[in-house]
Amino acid sequence: MTDTPLAGKTILLSGGSRGIGLAIALRAARDGANIALLAKTDTPHPKLEGTVHTAAQAIRDAGGRALPIVGDVRSDDDIAEAVLTTRGEFGGIDIVINNASVIDLSGSLELSAKKYDLMQDVNVRGTFMLSRAAIPVLRDAENPHILSLSPPLNITPRWLGAHTGYTLAKYGMTMATLGLAAEFASDGIAANTLWPRTTIATAAVQFALGGDRMMKVSRTPEIYADAAYEVITKPARERTGQTLIVEDVLAEAGVTDLSGYAAVPGTPDAELFPDIFLD
């Protein structure tokens, strides 16, 4: 394998204005990849840094080519346009990364119907529709991958009942991905999921899980990005239909010292906060 296996490859990524999605895009950009970002953030958010345009510039600065697409993964028209525009700009699509996601950990009686629908529409339907729209183009790729940032299907009561609405949405992402893996295995399209053992220092963790205190006991998005890179650069026919764990993927690649990924340098692994859905 070359030192830059993603050089000239095209990634279509949902979200990606910041956080894990942007970190994955920047890792690919270092190889010289083409990255199309389908994201809503056309203008700055009052609480969150980054727009699809600042992300695109960061990708270019890192050595990649960027195509910012302002759109919503809930819109079939926006998805269709994103696939067509990406293929038109870069000549194809090699990889789809389902990064866009909504989190709300409210209990079932507290969760609003509107938020329930939003999580289903973005996490489950968005993952399915974006992947489906890209499959006719992925079929022509040399090493086609679909990667969804969602957890293994852990059906223990501890996780099923912790935040049922969010659990349904994240497990739905995984089910959609595993279903596509089985359905299109004969086409050589890999479809896998990826999830971390510890919390990742992102806006979602800060605002939905535990503020600055939680950020200090998390790992940086780069650990997710490096693991995603390992997955999408492997031969598609060799690994598909799997629910992968970030740390296991890195260990398989020979990376066992994860201390450099601590959000606060020097934080022992034992003090890092375990992510949800994993026992």
Image: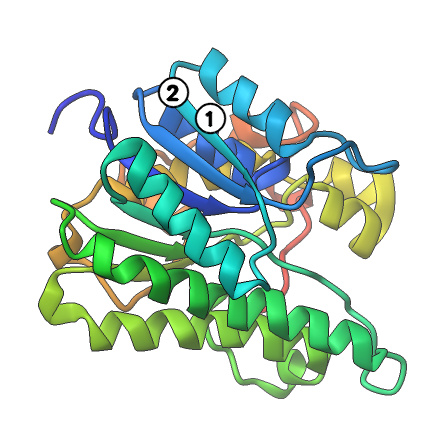
SS class of the residue under badge 2? loop
> Is residue 257 visible in the rendered structure shown here?
yes
Q: CA distance from mark 1 to mark 2?
A: 8 Å
In the image, taking residue 262 as reference, residue 127 lies left or right, namely: left
Which circle's residue, 1 or 2, is located before the other in the chain? 1
Q: Nearer the viewer, residue 165 or 16?
A: 16
In the image, taking residue 172 as reference, residue 114 lies left or right, namely: right
Q: Which residue is at a point 60% across and 65% down the rendered structure image?
A: 122
Quarter of the figure with the N terminus: top left
Q: Which residue is at a point 60% across and 74% down the rendered structure image?
A: 169
Residue that mark 1 sits on: 26
Labels 1, 2: front one = 2
Quarter of the figure with the C terminus: bottom right
Q: Nearer the viewer, residue 164 or 32?
A: 32
Q: Which residue is at a point 23% across and 63% down the rendered structure image?
A: 240
Q: Quadrant of residue 17?
A: top right
Where residue 40 appears, x then y in whole percent? 66, 46
Q: Is residue 212 above or below residue 242?
A: above
10 Å neighbourhood of mark 1: few (<14), some, or many (≥20)?
Answer: many
Residue that mark 2 sits on: 64
Q: Is residue 188 above or below residue 174?
A: above
Where residue 205 appears, x then y in whole percent? 74, 49
10 Å neighbourhood of mark 2: few (<14), some, or many (≥20)?
Answer: many
SS class of the residue under badge 1? helix
In the image, taking residue 268 as reference, residue 138 lies left or right, namely: left
Name the residue type under label 2: Gly
Badges 1 and 2: C-beta atoms under 8 Å apart?
yes
Name the residue type under label 1: Leu
